[in-house]
Image (cartoon, grey):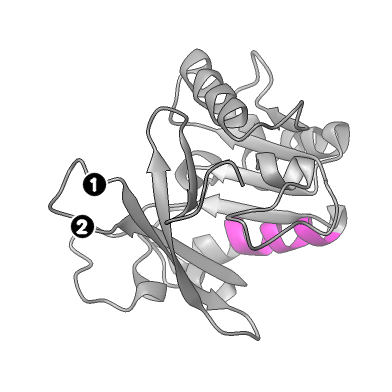
C-alpha cells in the first residue's frame, strides 16, 4: 500500500506506473495497534507521507461492506485507486460457503464498484484449515466462486511451517489472468513490519 501510494519500487523489481491513493480498510486490529504497525512499516521503508487512508473514526465496518453506500462515499472522498479489505470476512455480507450469495452479494457488486471508480480491489483472505496438497488457487476459505472471478490470486506462507522463528516467507502468485504465475522469496522484518526480497539489501 505504501509503495503504491508513493511510487516506490516493490520488492526491488516492480514499480507502480504512477503513485495513487490507497484506501486500507482493516477489521481485525484495534485502531492504535494497526496505525502503529503501519507507521513502523512506512518508516522502515523510508516512505514520506504516503497517501494511504484508513477507516475513519466512528465509522462502522458494516457501512463499508461491498455494496454499501458508505464504501462508495469513502472511495470518492479519498480518490483511492487501490482498496484493501483486511480481511474479506469483515467487509462482505455474503454467507462464506454459499456460492450463489458470494456471487450476488460480493463478486458482482465488487466488479461493478471497480468499474465505476476505475480502481483495483485487494481482498485479504484466509486459507482453509487443513488445505494440505490442495492446489494453491483453490485454498481460499469459503465459496469456490472466489477463485474463478479473481483476476490475480497471491498466497503468502512460511518458508518453514515448523520453525516459528523463521523470518522467510514465500509469496506465491497462483493466478494472473492472461499471464503466468510464479513465486518470490521474501524476508520479514518483525521490527519494522515489512518485507523485502530475500538476499536484497533493505537500503535498496
Q: Position of residue 65 (x, y in %)?
A: 62, 40
> Residue 158 versus residue 145: which sits nearer the camera?
158
Compute the Cα span from label 1 to label 2.
7 Å
Region rendered in magenta: 105-115
Q: Is residue 114 magenta?
A: yes
Q: Residues within 10 Å of mark 2 (few under 14, many from 20)?
A: few
Q: Given the current orientation, which residue lies at the most extreme left position?
A: 162
- Classify 202 as above or below 33: below
Tell whether 119 sits left or right of 136. Answer: right
Residue 46 seen in render: yes
Measured along the vertical axis of the image, is residue 136 above or below residue 53?
Answer: below
Q: Which residue is mark 1?
A: 166
Q: Is residue 94 left or right of residue 152?
A: left
**Badge 1 element:** loop
Dominant SS of magenta comes to helix
Question: What label sits on residue 147 in the rendered view?
Answer: none
Q: Position of residue 128 (x, y in %)?
A: 28, 60
Q: Is residue 62 left or right of residue 95?
A: right
How crowded pointer 1 is (Cα within 10 Å; few <14, some 14-19, many 20+) is rated as few
Q: Position of residue 82 (x, y in %)?
A: 73, 49
* Residue beneath the point at 12% across and 53% down: 162
Q: Nearer the viewer, residue 140 or 190?
A: 190
> Which residue, given by chain and number where applicable, does mark 2 sit on?
160
Amino acid at each position: 500500500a505504501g509503495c503504491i501510494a508513493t511510487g516506490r519500487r516493490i520488492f526491488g523489481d516492480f514499480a507502480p506506473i504512477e503513485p495513487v491513493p490507497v484506501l486500507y480498510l482493516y477489521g481485525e486490529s484495534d485502531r492504535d495497534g494497526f496505525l502503529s504497525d503501519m507507521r513502523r512499516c512506512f518508516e522502515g521503508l523510508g516512505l514520506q507521507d504516503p497517501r494511504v487512508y484508513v477507516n475513519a473514526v466512528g465509522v462502522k465496518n458494516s457501512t463499508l461492506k461491498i455494496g454499501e453506500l458508505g464504501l462508495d462515499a469513502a472511495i470518492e472522498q479519498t480518490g483511492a485507486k487501490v482498496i484493501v479489505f483486511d480481511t474479506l470476512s469483515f467487509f462482505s455480507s455474503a454467507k462464506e460457503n454459499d456460492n450463489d450469495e458470494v456471487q450476488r452479494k460480493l463478486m458482482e457488486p465488487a466488479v461493478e464498484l471497480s468499474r465505476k471508480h476505475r480502481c483495483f480491489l485487494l481482498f485479504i483472505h484466509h486459507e482453509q484449515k487443513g488445505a494440505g496438497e490442495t492446489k494453491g488457487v483453490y485454498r481460499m476459505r469459503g465459496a469456490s466462486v472466489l477463485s474463478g472471478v479473481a483476476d490475480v490470486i497471491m498466497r503468502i506462507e512460511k518458508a518453514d511451517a515448523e520453525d516459528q522463528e523463521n523470518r522467510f516467507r514465500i509469496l506465491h502468485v497462483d493466478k494472473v489472468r492472461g499471464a503466468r504465475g510464479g513465486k518470490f522469496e521474501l524476508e520479514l522484518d518483525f521490527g519494522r513490519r515489512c518485507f523485502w526480497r530475500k538476499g536484497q539489501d533493505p537500503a535498496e
